[in-house]
Every structure is written in structure tokens, then in C-alpha cells.
Amino acid sequence: MNTPGLYHILFISTALFFIGVYGFFTRRNLITILMSIELILNSVCLNFIAFNKYVWPEKLDGVFFTLFIIAIAAAEAALAIAIIINLYRSHNTIDVNAAEEMKY
Amino acid sequence: MPELILILLIPIMPFAAFLLLGLANGNFIKRWAGAIGTGAILVSAGAALLTAYDYFFVYGGSGGAYRKILVTEYEWLQFTPEISIKMGLLLDPVAVMMMVVISFISLMVHSYSICYLKGEQRFNIYFSYLGLFTFSMLALVMSSNIFQMYIFWELVGVSSFLLIGFYYQKPSAVAAAKKAFIITRFADLGLLIGILILAFEAKSLDFEAIIGQFGHGKSASVSTSSAWLGISTISWAMLLVFIGGAGKSAMFPLHVWLPDAMEGPTPVSALIHAATMVVAGVFLVARLFPVYYFSAPEILNLIAYVGVFSALIAAIIACTQTDIKRVLAYSTMSQIGFMMFSLGVSGFGEEGLGFTASQFHLFTHAFFKALLFLCAGLVIHEVHSNEVSKMGGLRKSMPLTHISFLIACLAIAGIPPFAGFFSKEEILLAAWERNKPVYWIALFTSALTAFYMFRLYFLIFRNSNKHLHQPEHREGSAGQMVPLFVLAAGSVVLGLIPFGRFVSSDGRPLATELHLVFSIAPVLLAILGVSTAAWLYNAPGNRPQEVSQRLGNLYKAAYHKFYIDEVWLFLTKKVIMNGIGKPAAWFDKNVVNALVNFSGNSTIGLASKIKKLQSGKVQLYGMVYLFTVIASVLIIIFFINRN
Amino acid sequence: MLPLWLLPALPVITALLVILLPAKHTKFVSLAGTILQMMAVALLTVSFAEQRREGNSSLFLFDEKIEWFSSWNASLHFGVDGISVAMILLTSLVVTAGILVSWNIEKQGKEFFILLLLLASGAYGFFISLDLFTLFCFLEIAVIPKFMLIGIWGSGNKNYSANKLALMLMAGSALILVGILFMYYQMPIGKRSFDFVTILSNPLPLQSQLILFPLVFVGFGIFTAIFPFHTWVPDGHSSAPTAGSMFLAGISMKLGGYGCLRVATTLMPEAAQHYSIVIVILAAIAIVYGAFATMMQTDLKYINAYSSISHCGFVLLGIGMLTKSGINGAVFQMVSHGLMTALFFAVIGMMYARTHTRKVSEMGGLLKTIPFISAAMFIAGLCSLGLPGLSGFPAEMTVFMGGWERPETIYRVVTVLACMSIVITAVYILRAIGSTVMGPVKNREFEELPKAMWNEKLAAVILIAGIVIMGVLPFVLYKLVNPATQEIIKQMATG
Amino acid sequence: MTASAVIFYLLALLTLGSALLAVTSRHIFRSAIYLLFSLIGMAGFYFWLQFEFIAAVQIVVYAGGIAVLIIFSVFLTQKSGELLPPQKGSRKFFSALAAFCGFALCMLQIVKHSFPLDDHDFGGPRVADIGQQMLSIDDKGYALPFEVVSILLLAAMIGCIVIAMKSGSRQEAIGSENASK
């Protein structure tokens, strides 16, 4: 086991990504699904930073992307939670299977 | 030379009457419909007589023979440059003779009908239909083109349908009209196919061309070139054409419509179902006689047997029927059988006695049979029933009708010197000369004819002991009696016309003479028939029943018309309706339609299955998506990107 | 001469006027528009005959071309030959009668008339189009209103019928569209065109014809009730409102026949020859089988619908024979059947409005109570069974002659089979007439029925006049149609 | 094994472990806390990579903002002490399979691929550089995305307020909409 580098980081981020995916697939509560999505976003951020660090260390694009992702994630989380709360108000539950009025 | 206007007038006048009476709806027209119709026919009949005179004595003959004269012709519908329907007027002895008969009998019937149908709701419609019929029949006999003839053939059929069904609220009349139309239509199918074959064999539809091609001695070799089932194509065509004629002329087994057709008004029966339309088949065979004789002799032979068989069977049935009009109908069928077999046994040219005799019999028969029907109409009018059992002893209350009926009966029985005697003698002579078996059957049939006609006569006019009749039985009005007298006079004297001089198979005058020795047997048999009838029916007691019981099954079979109606009913109801129609409808509903519905339903079913995939469950979508991505990536890596 | 595009445009303009004006004017505006288009059609016919007499022998007269989709080389290309003129005449008569018959429609009259007018526009456009793309568009215009006519104003099992009709006809259209596009892409790049004349002068190679012909022929064949695809006919006709049935049977089924002749047969003559035997056999099946199936029906509309299958079989039979008389006969039969069946449906509608039944067994003796309508029914029936003097006779006889012209045994057998149908036709027609119009009055309520109105009389008279004129003077129509047919036959010989 | 490596592995353990617990725990509040730990672990990685600014942002926005937001919403929507409904076993299995397959496939590709590594260690970026480039409007500047993101944030904020607003009329409108569905 040598010094941790790009590959280790990529392993972490990939694992994190698929843990998020697993959560996305298995969870039924909307908030927990949102949490899984946050994990996925985080794994992407980590990738950006890692590539920025190990492949193009003289550039800053990875940083910017990460920043924007964090900003958009924040907005998205806020919106999602607004929707979730609204859904809770009307349906009294936030189970994904409960909201199916628009099916078919 | 023929005058076009005069000849055109003959069919045009009844047609004009048809249009005027059928379309106009005013009170004036309604009241005077009879007079208008009769007037139109009067003009037509006058023109016909004039034309006949001109034709026979002025311009028709040339070089000792009567020519066929094509007065006018117009191309109506072209199929190929050679084959086209033309509307033409053709004059030849047969056509001219028919023309005279039709317009004359029609005139009589029109005049008779004015009083007969007085007060009828649809008085004008009746005369309109009569006009249509007369027009079509006249145009039929004057046709120059076989397809033109077919056209008017159909029109005659439909006017017959309309007139039989004139009392349209009577279910039996409607049924009879339908039966008549459908059976003749079925026969016309044969005629149509025959025409199709003939048209492409002869490369023309004109009578002249067809006869020119097949109606002479040399044509036999040409026509046998192509054959099917051992019979040449042209023979097949002529057989099919004959089937058409047999349908119209009520030959066995297509005769079943004729007795039922008596549901129509009696004058109609006199005109259509006795004198004119039913002899159209005879006319058709006569028209194409040279083709039959030279190119399809086997069919001509068949015609002889069909004719004589029909004559016999109809005569037997006639002996047992109790409805006056039905007896007359069977008698008509029997007499047409005489005409048919006479054509069948005829030779050509010098030996064409049968042809002449057939036409002669057609001519005389028209008179005495129309007379019989008109008398029957008067009787029915008085008694209010068709059944002979309700009649009897009418001699006293209707003396003039009685005399007329008696004359007609004598004429049809072949008692000299009435008209029927001469024509029937010629027919029998022709049969004697050329076909002995036919002769013997015909001889027997003519004796039967005398028997059943006088059976009718005795039952109606004598034999008064059965029922008592009120004295107010009267004769018909003048409008009805005059036609009776005219026709009766015709039935007496017309036999003296030297018919062979005018009408013969090749247009040349044919000398016919009376063989007194030969006539003895038929006349004696006729007298035997009359006396048997007198013995059975003009005497007190129960002789008819005894005889019929003694005859047993034969009587029963004859009384039930040999069950031919039942056979037809079985064929149409059971075989065609249930055997073909129902399966077809079932097939359409349960196979073809079901296939369409199945394809629709299976689409809906498939869609509702697929619909489940659109569950709206994002997680499921995601999973499917991920699996798909993985699978595609694997495929790309391991299969496509390998090299 | 008026420009040809006016023909499809006139109904559309009338429909626009109907939309704009208040509902009480609807009927009169429609009638005025229809009369106007009738006059236009009369003018067209007269000037067509005039031009032909003057010796103008070009294939299509009054040729005009308006750019439309220039990128696809599709244009509004209009022109007429004798066959189109005959069909246009038929359309104008049926449309006028249909408008007259619907005079007393109560429910959503405005929309009803608009749809009728749209249908008429589609039919006119279809018959004058010389560009396959335009032709297809007009075909669709003529199909879609029918769905609504049946679905909204229909009776009985109307949803099912409307869906079935629309889906089956759409399937036919789809096949046609595939065929048209195939033809388009068969042409070399740069010369690609939907133009009829262009395709005619650059015939397709035999191999593609053989693939394409069945598609296009069956596609149009569905419209004209080719044998296994005929089931929309009975359901559609019986559910449609009176005018809808008239248009459906009188015009729509003719779109198919015309398409089979103009698009399938003329553009792909070799394939037509190749498949002729199949067409002829299918047609004979339709004729005989349709006639037998008719015999078992008890509903007047079903009787007429099934008999339409049988009669339209004659159209396909005539086309399939590929002889001059055959094709002439097919066109005659289209005109004749259009008039006759429209009259029949009009009469059935009138009877239904009075007796509230269409069952044969429940009527009877109507000749006494409604003589005019009954007489019209008589005439329609007699025309249907091919009585001389009415239009059915020359049509059927020409088809038979055309069939017999082919010397091969199988064609003759088929012709004889087809001939047999005239007897079966007589059976079912007389059965229907005998128990509705004739016979005793079965229902006391039918003793007193309202007499025919002026509009009904006029509608019937227009159609009867057409039937009688064609029946008595078939040579007029012959002279109109024959030159066009001869061109097709010539094409067949050279192609 | 250097201290750096030890820290790395500890961080990895923290991040992945708490992430796993976050997606599997049936106590929703606990899983929110596990998520918080995971996010902090991520921030640790950023520190480890010497991207201090990003790490700070991560802690402020994610750990401080989003996590708190989530915890609040859990409070708002969830009754305390209630377990999340269990998921079907088959669903769990196939999800795990999908995730594992995806992970394996990605790792396979990552390992096979050789990235063009730059061995010069520049250390972390300076915050000043980040600010300069973020707001510059030259070729490499991010001024435009910055503005876009700020408008997006604004819009999202307004959207949140509108959606979550508890006004009577709106509520009725939504209610009737639901009813009509």
C-alpha cells in the first residue's frame, strides 16, 4: 500500500457515488432520497478537486466547478425541501409511492 | 321503305303513357288515366297494324323472301370497338307478328281494365305500369341487338314484378311478385352468361352478326373448335340462352313462378302471363333459331324434350287444380311447352314447319288465352272468388261471357274450325315428321288439354246444382265486353290465315296444308277429352271424387304440383339461406370481424401491459437506467471496442 | 374556366362563413355554398367537354401548379381527366343531397355542417390532385371528419364504430403513405418529386413495383372495402348519421377505388398485371360473399352496408381485369354505386326519422303511408339489383364485359361468379323492399306518417335524376371516361 | 506509512462508513447525523488535499447549511422515534447489485486508465487567485457563471418561499387542484 494518490481518491469518490445510488434506489422517504443525492453530488465534487490537484494542478477550474456545484446543491436542497414540506402538507406523508396522482 | 316515325311511334306511345301517368299526380290525370293509356295504346296498335301491312305487303318481301330490315340503330354503350350495345329497331316477320299481337292484346287489356279497376286507389299507377310493360315488350321484340333485348327482357321482368305486386298490401301478392322476379332473374343469369360467351365467340352482339356467323351450314366446324365437357362453346352459350328463355316462358323446372303470378290483377295475367311476356322465351329461341339449328342441334333437341315435358306435366297439374286462374296458368305453361317443342323439332327452310307452327300457335294462343283470362276476370268479379267450387251455372246469368269462354275453350282444345285447331295440327304434324316420341306425348297432352279446359267450363258455367246464385249476376260493361267479342272473333277466324306465307324460319313462304287424315286422331282425342269432362263434371253425383280416389297417389302428386315448389323452397331456404347465407354472415361476424377486433384488443392488451413500465416510480427508473448503462458499457467494452 | 383550386376551397369558405355567422343561418349558408359548388362543377364539366371536343388531348386538363413544400418538391398540382370529372360530378350530387337531408339536424348543427363541408372539400381536393403528397393530405382531410360525424352524431354502438372506422382507414392511409414515400425515394436525388406526371414518365423498376403495389393497393382497397378489410363498412355505415352514411358510402369508398385506379394501377402497371389475378379473386370473394352476408341482415342500414361491400367488389373487379371495359366499368360502378347508395341511405334515414326503426321485420306497407319515400326506395333497390334504365345496369354489364374480355379461364370463372351476385342481389333487395315498402301495414302507428318534406324530396330527386340519366344515357359518361381509360390502357401496354 | 496516509485512511473510513450508515439506517434522524459526518469527512479530504477554501465552503454550506436544513425538515415531517418503513428485500438486493456492478465497472476502468499525472506539488490554491479568476471577465474568468448561479440562487430562494408559503388562497388552489385530479 503506497502513498494515497489520485486512484485512492477516485476509489473513495466512486464508492461514495454508488453508496448514494444505493440509497437512492432503496429509500422510500423523500428526505433520505435527498440525502442520497447529496452524497452523489459530494462524490462528484471530490472528483473535481482530485483531478484538479493531480492532473492540472496549475489550474482552478475544478475548484470553480465544485463551488458552483455546492451552490446549486444548496439551492436544490432548499427547493427540494420546500417541495417535500408541501407534499407533506397535502398528503401527510413523504413516501415516494404516495404521490401518484399524475401517474398515467 | 319503312317509315321511321311510324315505327318509332309503336314503342314510344306506351312509354309516354308510362311517364305521364307515373309522374303526374293531378286529379285530372288520375281520373282519365285509363283513357290516356288506352288512347296511347290505340295509336301504338294502329301504327303496328299499319307497319305490319306495309312490311308484309309493300316493302318487306324481296326476291320471294321477307328480309330483315334494320330501321335505325344508335350505339348506346360501347365495350370494345366491335362489341357494343346498340339500340336499334329490327323488322322481320316474327318481330312484326309479335308487335301486332302485343299491341293488339295490350289494347284489349287496357280497354278491359278501365272498368275492371274502376275506383282503385292507384288507378293511374296501374296504367302507368301497363304502359311500361307494353313499351318494354314491344322494344324487346324489335331489338336488333341481343344485349338490347336483354335490357328490355329485364324491364319486362320488372314490370311483371310491379304488376303482380300491384295489390302490394296482400302478402301473397308480394311473395308471388318476389318469386316471379327472382326465378326469372336466376334464369336471366343464364341468358347473361350466354350472351357474354356469344359476344366473344361472334365478336358482336348484333343478331345479324351472330346469326351471320353461326346460323348457316358452314359454321358447325368453326364452333366445335373449342369445347368443354364434350359440348362446343357455342352450344354452351345457346344452352344458357335457352335457360333464360325457359325462365321467362315458365318451362320446367323454372315454371313455379307462373301459377303464383296469378296474384296480380286478372287483366295483367291476360296480358303478361298468358299472351305476351311468357312467350318471350319462345321468341328468343325463334330469334336465334338458325344458330340453334346449325351450331347447337343438341340443344335444340333438348328444347324439344323440355318443351314437351313441360307441356305434359303442366297439363296433368291443370287437371287437378281448383283455382280458376291457376288452371289457366298451367294451361298457359302447357301451351308454351307446345310452342317450345315445336321449335325444338323444327328443321330449317323447307323443313321448317315446326318453326312456323310454333309462331302460329303463339299467335292464336295469344288470342284465346287472353280471352279465357278476361272471361275469368269477369267471373271472378261476379263471384268474388277464384275457387271453382264457388262457381257453377253461370251460363244463365252471364250468357255472353259464357259464349266467349266456350269459344276459347274450343279453340284451345283444338276443335275445328277454331284457331287453335290449325296451329296445333301444324305442331303435331311437325312433331310427327321429325320426332315420334315427342309426337305421342304431345298427342296425349292435347287430349288432356281438352279435358281440363272443359272441366273448367263445366264447373263454371254448367253444373248448376251445387250452389244457388242470385239473379243479379250481370255481364261486364261495354268496355269489357267489346274486347271479349273481338278476341272471340279472333279465336274463331284467325286460324284461317295462311301463316306459313308470312312467318317461316328463313323468311321464304312455307306452304302448309291441312292433312285431314292426320287430323282425325287429335280431334277424336280432343272430343274424348271433352266428353270425359262432361261425364265427370256435368253430371250429378260424386264422380270426380271417386276418380281422384281411384288415382290415389298420382292425383295427390298432381294436386301438389308434383312438389316442385317444395323442392325450390328447400333449395332457397335450406340450401342457399341456411347453407350459404348464414355461414357467410357468421364467418363475417365471427372470423373476419373477430380478427379486426382481435388486433384492436391485442393492441389494447399489449398497451396495458407496457403501461405498467411507466410506473412513475423514479427509483425503478433509476435502477433500470443504471442496469442499462452498465449493460451498454459492457457491450461497448467487450464486443464493440474489442479491437 | 374557374381555377381548379376553387373546388376544394369553396366548401372551406362556406365552412368559414358558417363559423362566423350566427347559427340560424347555418343551413342556408351551407346550401348556398353547395349550390355554388354544384354550379362550379357543372361549369367544369361543360368546359372539360368543350376542350375535349376542340381536340385538346393532353392527359390532364386545366393543369395548374402552386408551389407548396418546395423543399420536398411537393406542390399543389391540380388537373382533371375524364375519370376525375366523373367522380367530381358524383361528389357534387352526393354533397348537395347530403346537405339537404341533414336540414333538420338538431344537435350542434353548426359543427355538423362544417364537418360535412370539410369532408366535401377533402373529396374534391383528392379527385383533382395530381401530386401524391397533396392527394394524401386531402385523403386525410376526408377521413378525419368522419370519425367525428359518427362519434358525435351517430347512433347505436357509435364509439366502437367510429374507432374502428378511423383506425382501419388510418391503417390504410399509413400503407398509402409508406407507398408514396417509397416512390419518392425511389427517384434519383435531385429529381425526387411527388408529382403524378413526373412519376408516370419515370416508371419505377419492376422490383420495387412488386413490393410497393400491394401496399398502395391494399391501402386504398381498405377504403373501398377490399375483402378481408371490409368490416368497418357495416359498423361505420350503420352507426353514422344519415348524411354521414351517404358521404361515407357515396364518396369515401370512391376515394379508395379512385386511388386504386389512379395511384396504384396507373403508376405501377407492371405490378398491376402481376397481381391482377389476386385482385380479381379478392374482388369476386367480396362480391359473392358480401351478397350472401347481406341476405342474412335484418337492419336496413346493414343490408345496404353489406351490399356496398358487394358492389364495391365490382369496382375492384373491373380494375383488376385491366381491360378497357373493366376500368370503364369500375368508374361507372363507382359513380352508380355512389348515387344509388346515397339515395338508399337517404331513404333509410327518412324512414327512420318517421318510424324510429330500421328493422326490416318491423316495417311494412310504407308505400301506402309515405309513397314518395317508398318509391325512392324502390328506385334505389332496383338500381342496386342492376335494372336496365338505372345506373347500376351499364356499370355492372361493362364490368362483366371487361371481365369476359380476358380469355384466361380463371378470369372467366371469376366473372361468372360475379354475375351470380345479380341473382343474390335481387333476393336480398326484394326481401328488403318486399317487407318494408310492400305488404300490410304492420304497426298501427305507421298508418299516419308525415309526408316527405321539400328538402327530402329535392335530395331524392337530385340523386334519382343522376341515376336515371346515367342509366338511360350511359354513352354520355362513356364519352367522358373512355379517353382517360384508354390512356391508362396505353400506359399499361407501353409500361 | 506516513501520517498523511494514516489520516487519509481514517478520513476514508469516516466518510464511507458514515455514508453507508446514512443510507441504511432506519432512524431518519440518525441517518441525517451520519450524513453530517460524511460531509465533514469530505471536508477533511479537501483539507488533506490542501484545498482549504473549498473545505471551508463545504463545512459552511453543506455541514452548516444543508445538513441543518435536512434536520429541520426531518423535524417538520417526521414523528420522533418512528422507524422508516422497511424496503423489500429483493429491491435491496437488486439495488446493491446495481450499485456494486456500477462500482466495479467504474473501478475497472479507472484502474485500467492511466491519467497524465502532474507530479509537481503546487500546494493548494490561493484564495486570492480563486477570487480573481471567479470575478474576472477575461477568457478564463467565471464572471458569467457566477452571475448565472447567483440569479439561480435568487430564483430558488423565491421559489422556495412561494412553494412553502402557507397562504390561505394558495392552499385552497392546491387543494382544489388535487381534488380535480
Image: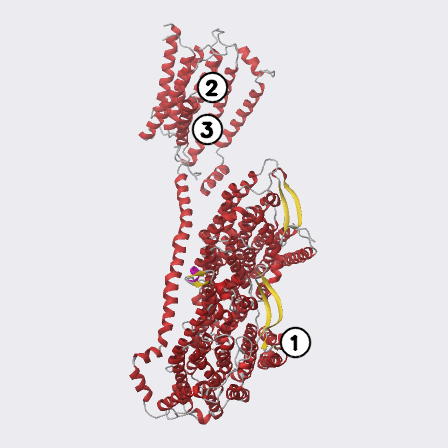
Does residue B33 lie above or below C246 as drawn? below
Magenta stretch bounds: C291-295
Q: Quadrant of the C terminus of chain B?
A: top left
Contact flag, marks 1 and 3 (Cβ < 8 Å): no
Residue type beneath disc 1:
Met
Residue identified by numbered label 2 = D61
Q: Residue under mark 1: which chain is it in? A: B
Q: Are marks 2 and 1 on the same chain?
A: no
Residue at the spot of label 1: B1
**Can the viewer see residue D36 in this picture?**
no
User: Is residue C294 rendered magenta in the image?
Assistant: yes
Q: Which mark is residue B230?
A: none
Amino acid type shown at disc 2 = Val
A72 and B596: which is toward the camera: B596
Q: Is the N terminus of chain B in the top left, top right, bottom left or bottom right quadrant? A: bottom right
User: From where the camera sits, is residue C477 visible?
Assistant: yes
D12 relative to C488, above or below = above
Q: Is residue D104 magenta?
A: no
Q: Find numbered disc 2 in the image and state the secondary structure of the residue it sits on.
A: helix
Disc 3: which residue: A80
Location of residue C23 in the rendering, given as x and y in whole percent from the top left corner: 60, 56
Q: CA distance from mark 2 to mark 3?
A: 16 Å
Q: Which of the pair C244/B468 is nearer the observer?
A: B468
Q: Find residue B448 and report its horizontal and vertical position in percent.
A: 39, 83
* Crowd around label 2: few <14 · some 14–19 · many ≥20 (10 Å): some
| Mark 3: amino acid | Ala
